[in-house]
Structure formats: C-alpha cells, structure tokens
Image (cartoon, grey):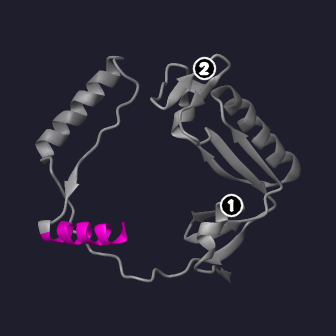
Amino acid sequence: MHNFPQGKIHSMIKTNEVVLKVNNECLHFAEPKQIIVANTLEDVLPALRETERLVNVNEWYAAGFLSYEAASAFDPALRTKVVVPTEDSTVQDVEFPFLWFGLYPGPRVITLPEPEHQKENLDWQPTTDRDTYKSSIDQIREHIAEGRTYQVNFKLKNNTSPVTQLILDLKNNMVN
C-alpha cells in the first residue's frame, strides 16, 4: 500500500491518471498504454468494442467513463439535451467526451490523504413531504408504464438550518 501525496490529485488530470475506490481500496491507475476517446456518438460503440478487445488481448485494465450523454449511441430514442446534430456527426456542445478510457497494465493500491479540515455536519431536510414525494414517484412510474417517457430525472430539494446555510454562504463568498 502506497501513500498518495496531497498535491498529486490536481496533476492527475493532465497525466491521464485515475483513482477508483473498489471494496474499500483505492486503486491508482497511471501511465496508460493507450487512451481511447469518443467525441461523437458514432464513435462510442466502436470505441467501446476496441477498449474491450485491447483489454482482453493485452490483459490490461480499463479505467474511465461512459458519459450519460452517450445514451443515444445505444438507442436513438434516448436523447439528451447536450447533444447537437451537425452535418457530419453528432457532437456535444461542451468540450467533454462521450467516452474516455485509459488502458493500464494494472493499478497500485494507495492510501489517500486525510482531509485538512473536518467535514461540516449538516442537518439536511427535504422540502417535500413524504406524501407529495410518493405521489410524484407514482405519477412518474405511471408515465413510464404508459410509454410517455423512458426516464425522468426527479430532483428532491433539501435545505439545512438557516444558520448553517449562512455560514456556508459566507465561506463560499470568502473563497470566490
């Protein structure tokens, strides 16, 4: 097990390093043998297949992500707002790939540094009562069952005490 230097995390993005937590262990993937990126929907499935092929052939590990916005590559009915069709292909309107995987020879087990400051203990409370929440979920399930939608992103707003919120707002304003 290796200790992980405090300042190292920010530089990992530039060097294509990945840390994953698996079964209470942190796995550090560094020095990828290859990077596979899909910037268009049309490239997602071929990139995924190539990732799988290279992992199997070379006994490498793949660490990365498949973005939510890549859903249309698997089923055209699943549209996301970030996708913008162009003459040549479908790209996202942000500079973020649909798929990114680094292919690594294997990870090192590491210990992440302890936080410098203790976490705030916030007493979050939902702003929606249980009956309204249950009614909303039942309505969403009904829409899905009747085929009016494939998926719904349901958000539940939470608040903390006004004093705690004021402290957080003050801290955020001092940092920004």
Side (left or right) of 145 relative to 170: right
Q: Is residue 22 above or below residue 60?
A: below
Kindly state the secondary structure of the residue where label 1 is placed.
loop
Kindly state the secondary structure of the residue where label 2 is placed.
loop
Residue ID at (27%, 24%):
142
Q: Which mark is residue 86?
A: 2
Asked if the stretch drawn in magenta spans residue 42, the answer is no
Q: Position of residue 18 (x, y in %)?
A: 65, 61
Dot 1 amino acid type: Lys
Dot 2 amino acid type: Thr
Residue ID at (29%, 67%):
173
Q: Give residue 88's quadrant in the image.
A: top right
Q: Which residue is mark 1?
A: 14
Q: Which residues are magenta?
A: 163-176
Total marks drawn?
Answer: 2
Side (left or right) of 26 relative to 52: left
Q: Main secondary structure of the magenta part?
A: helix
Q: Position of residue 70 (x, y in %)?
A: 57, 33
Q: Sequence-wise, which precedes: disc 1 or disc 2?
A: 1
Asked if the stretch drawn in magenta spans residue 175, the answer is yes
Residue ID at (24%, 35%):
137
Q: Give residue 120's quadrant in the image.
A: bottom left
Foreground residue among 79 and 172: 172
Image marks 1 and 2: residues in contact by CB distance under 8 Å: no
Quadrant location of the C terminus in the rendered image: bottom left
